């Protein structure tokens, strides 16, 4: 099994593109180190759907009784 020499290339997309144009027969593995994209904006419709889902099961899930958390109930 032959060893494939690895070479690290770091730069902007434009810089790497220029390098790739000069070496059209070479193979590359691209790993993005930083992402300049802005975070996705708040989606009110998605928030409303999630809250509606949570509210639809509110009170339907099993829970401990209110007195289960009292100090006195620990010693009974």
Image: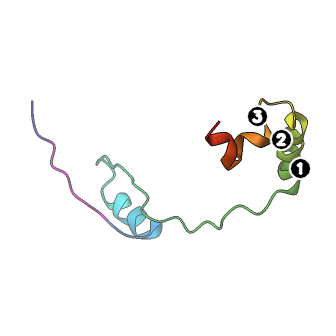
67 w.r.t. 60: above or below: below
Image quadrant holding the N terminus, namely: top left
- Find the magenta span and give its range: 4-9
Q: How is the image coloured?
A: rainbow
Q: Residues within 10 Å of mark 1 (few under 14, many from 20)?
A: few
Tell us which disc is closer to us: 1 or 3.
3
Q: Are marks 2 and 1 in contact (CB under 8 Å)?
A: no
Q: How far apart, in angstroms, are the residues tagged by discs 2 and 1?
A: 10 Å
40 w.r.t. 76: above or below: below
Sequence-wise first label, 1 or 3: 1
Residue occupied by mark 1 = 48
Sequence-wise first label, 2 or 1: 1
Q: Position of residue 47 (x, y in %)?
A: 83, 52
Q: Residues within 10 Å of mark 2 (few under 14, many from 20)?
A: few
68 w.r.t. 20: above or below: above
Residue occupied by mark 2 = 54
Magenta highlight on residue 16: no
Q: Position of residue 36 (x, y in %)?
A: 56, 69
The secondary structure that most of the magenta stretch takes on is loop
- For image coordinates 44% across by 58% down, the residue present is 32
Identify the disc placed on residue 56. none
Q: Residues within 10 Å of mark 3 (few under 14, many from 20)?
A: few
- The answer to which quarter of the image holds residue 54 is top right
Q: Position of residue 16 (x, y in %)?
A: 39, 64
Secondary structure at numbered mark 2: helix
Residue occupied by mark 3 = 63
Q: Is residue 76 left or right of residue 10?
A: right
Q: Is residue 8 left or right of residue 53?
A: left
Sequence-wise first label, 3 or 2: 2
Q: How far apart, in angstroms, are the residues tagged by discs 3 and 2?
A: 15 Å
Q: Position of residue 6 (x, y in %)?
A: 19, 51
- For image coordinates 71% across by 61% down, the residue present is 40
């Amino acid at each position: 099994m032959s060893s494939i020499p690895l070479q690290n290339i770091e730069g902007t997309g434009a810089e790497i593109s220029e390098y790739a144009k000069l070496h059209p027969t070479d193979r590359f593995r691209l790993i993005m180190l930083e992402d300049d994209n802005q975070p996705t904006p708040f989606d009110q419709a998605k928030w409303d759907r999630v809250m509606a889902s949570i509210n639809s099961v509110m009170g339907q899930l099993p829970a401990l009784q209110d007195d289960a958390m009292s100090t006195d109930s620990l010693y009974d």
